[in-house]
C-alpha cells in the first residue's frame, strides 16, 4: 500500500465515479458550444498581481486563500484561484478584442486552487466550467449566460436549484451607496480585519458568512435603493428577458459575490440540498476588470459553475446520469492463435466506434469470463482453435447467456446489430 495520500482538501477522480464528472462537464459545455463560445485554456498559474488587481486585494481569496510561490528567477506566481482574470488576460494578450466581432465569447474548464478549511463541497483543489463574453454591454448577453447555465442544469435533470439575482450598480451610483454602507458598518461591533475591509471594500462585509456578523447587518442600506436610473433600466431588462424565457429567479438585494470586479448584474445558482455550501455556481458583469489589469475598457460578463458541487447536487436529488458503458464488448481468446486474431478484431471494433476491451495477461477461460462480467460489457466475443478453423467466433450475450457463432469477417456488423 502506498504511503502517500492526496493532499488535505483535495480529491482524486477515479473510475467509475469520474465518468459522472466528465458527463457534468460535457453537459455544462454543450449549450455554450451551441451559442458561439470557443474553448480557451490558460496556465494553472499566473502572475500574483493579476489576481491582486483583478480579484481584489480586500477579498479573502487574495488575502488568505491563494497558493503563491516564488520561482528560481524571482517571479511571484499564484496557482489560479478563479478563471475570469486568467481568461481575460489571455484574450487581451492575443488581441482577440481587436479581431472584429464583439463580444469575444469563450468557455473553459479546469482546476482551481484555494487554501480553505476543507469540508464537503469546499475543497482546496476544485473543478469548474466557466464562460465569458468580453467586450459588449447588453442586458441580453447577461440574460443569455444565465439561461445557458440554467439549461445546462436542466439537461442534467436538476430541478431543486434556485437563481439569485441582484444589481451592484456602477461607477456612477455605487459611491453614494458605499458611503452610506460605510457609515452603517462603522457603528457595528466588528473585528479589526473586518473593519479594515470596511475602508477598502465595504461590500465584502455583506458577503461575510459568520452568523455574528450577519445578525448585525439587519437594517443595512440596500444597494437597490441607490441605483441610478440607467442601472435600474439595465437590471429590469435582464429580469424581463429571463421572465420571457420562463427562467425563474429570486431578487436578492444582499447578493454581492466574493470578488471585487463585479458591476451591475450579479447572480448565483444555489441548491438547498447541499447544506452550508449551497452555491453551485455564479457570476455577473465585470465592466471595469479589463482596465484594472491594464487593458482597454471592455464591458464583460461571465460565470463559473462548480463541477464538484454540481455532482453533489445530483446526488442530493438522487439523480443517476444515463452514462454510456465504459465497455460494450469484451474479447476472450482461448489459445495463442485466437489471441492474435481477436486482438485484430478488438482493434476493428474500436475503429468502428464500439467500446471494446480484451482479456489481457493470458487468463484462463474462467478468469477471462469473470473479467468480462466485471467490465460491464453486454457482449463477449469468444474464440478458440476450433472456432478459427471454422472461420467463426462465438458472440455471447452476457445478460441473457445466449451464445451463437458469427463469421469472423462479420463480427463488427453483428456486434453493431446486437447493440442497436
Image: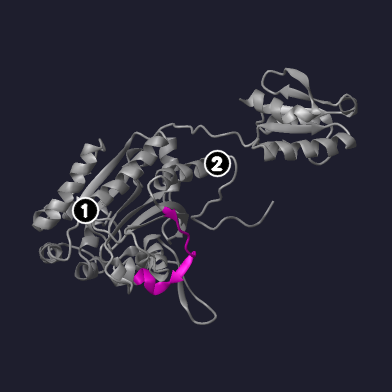
Residue reaching furthest to the bottom: 73
Q: Residue at x 69, y 51 (%)?
A: 1
Residue 146: give x, y in percent of width and height. Answer: 30, 46
Q: Is residue 382 magenta?
A: no
Displayed quadrant of residue 117: bottom left
In this picture, residue 44 sits left or right of residue 170:
right
Q: Residues within 10 Å of mark 2 (few under 14, many from 20)?
A: some
Front one among 356 and 70: 356
Displayed quadrant of residue 378: top right
Residue 29: give x, y in percent of width and height. Answer: 44, 46
Q: Which mark is residue 322?
A: none
Considering only vertical position in the picture, is 154 above or below 235?
above
Could you say whether the residue bearing mark 2 is in a helix, strand or loop? helix
Q: Quadrant of the C terminus?
A: top right
Front one among 20 and 243: 243
Considering only vertical position in the picture, is 20 above or below 262?
above
Q: Which mark is residue 19?
A: 2
Q: Earlier in the sequence, mark 2 or mark 1?
A: 2
- The answer to whether mark 2 and mark 1 are in CB contact below 8 A is no
Q: Residue at x 64, y 37 (%)?
A: 353
Question: Where is mark 1, residue-wise?
Answer: 214
Residue reaching furthest to the front: 100
In this picture, residue 253 sits left or right of residue 336:
left
Q: Residue at x 19, y 44 (%)?
A: 239
Displayed quadrant of residue 418: top right
Considering only vertical position in the picture, is 42 above or below 396?
below
Could you say whether the residue bearing mark 1 is in a helix, strand or loop? helix
Q: Is residue 45 magenta?
A: yes
Front one among 197 and 228: 228
Residue 226: give x, y in percent of width and height. Answer: 10, 58
Q: Which residues are magenta?
A: 38-52
Q: Residues within 10 Å of mark 1 (few under 14, many from 20)?
A: few
Amino acid at each position: 500500500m502506498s504511503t502517500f495520500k492526496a493532499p488535505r482538501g483535495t480529491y482524486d477522480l477515479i473510475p467509475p465515479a469520474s465518468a459522472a464528472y466528465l458527463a457534468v462537464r460535457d453537459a455544462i459545455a454543450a449549450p455554450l458550444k451551441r451559442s458561439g463560445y470557443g474553448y480557451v485554456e490558460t496556465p494553472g498559474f499566473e502572475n500574483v498581481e493579476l489576481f491582486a488587481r483583478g480579484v481584489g486585494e480586500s477579498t479573502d481569496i487574495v488575502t488568505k486563500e491563494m497558493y503563491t510561490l516564488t520561482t528560481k528567477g524571482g517571479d511571484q506566481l499564484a496557482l489560479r484561484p478563479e478563471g475570469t482574470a486568467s481568461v481575460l488576460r489571455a484574450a487581451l494578450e492575443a488581441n482577440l478584442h481587436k479581431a472584429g466581432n464583439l463580444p469575444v465569447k469563450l468557455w473553459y474548464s479546469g482546476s482551481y486552487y484555494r487554501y480553505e478549511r476543507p469540508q464537503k463541497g469546499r475543497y482546496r483543489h476544485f473543478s469548474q466550467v466557466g464562460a465569458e463574453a468580453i467586450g459588449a454591454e447588453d442586458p441580453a448577453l447577461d440574460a443569455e449566460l444565465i439561461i445557458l447555465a440554467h439549461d445546462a442544469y436542466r439537461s442534467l435533470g436538476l430541478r431543486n436549484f434556485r437563481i439569485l439575482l441582484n444589481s451592484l450598480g456602477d461607477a456612477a451610483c455605487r459611491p453614494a451607496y458605499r458611503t452610506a454602507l460605510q457609515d452603517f458598518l462603522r457603528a457595528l461591533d466588528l473585528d479589526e480585519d473586518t473593519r479594515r475591509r470596511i475602508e477598502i471594500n465595504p461590500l465584502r462585509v455583506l458577503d461575510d458568512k459568520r452568523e455574528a456578523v450577519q445578525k448585525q447587518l439587519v437594517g443595512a442600506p440596500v444597494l437597490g435603493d441607490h441605483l441610478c436610473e440607467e442601472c435600474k433600466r439595465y437590471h429590469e431588462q435582464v429580469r424581463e428577458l429571463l421572465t420571457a424565457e420562463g427562467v425563474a429567479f429570486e431578487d436578492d438585494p444582499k447578493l454581492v459575490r466574493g470578488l471585487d470586479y463585479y458591476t451591475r448584474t450579479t447572480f448565483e445558482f444555489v441548491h438547498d440540498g447541499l447544506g452550508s455550501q449551497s452555491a453551485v455556481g455564479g457570476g455577473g458583469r465585470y465592466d471595469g476588470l479589463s482596465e484594472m489589469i491594464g487593458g482597454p475598457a471592455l464591458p464583460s460578463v461571465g460565470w463559473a459553475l462548480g463541477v464538484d458541487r454540481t455532482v453533489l447536487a445530483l446526488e442530493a436529488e438522487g439523480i443517476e446520469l444515463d452514462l454510456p458503458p465504459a465497455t460494450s464488448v469484451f474479447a476472450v481468446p482461448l489459445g495463442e492463435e485466437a489471441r492474435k486474431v481477436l486482438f485484430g478484431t478488438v482493434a476493428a471494433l474500436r475503429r468502428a466506434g464500439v467500446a471494446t476491451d480484451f482479456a489481457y495477461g493470458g487468463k484462463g477461460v474462467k478468469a477471462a469470463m469473470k473479467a468480462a462480467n466485471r467490465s460491464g460489457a453486454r457482449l463477449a466475443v469468444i474464440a478458440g482453435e476450433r472456432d478459427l478453423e471454422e472461420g467463426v467466433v462465438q458472440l455471447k450475450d452476457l445478460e441473457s447467456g445466449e451464445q451463437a457463432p458469427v463469421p469472423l469477417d462479420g463480427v463488427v456488423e453483428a456486434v453493431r446489430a446486437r447493440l442497436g
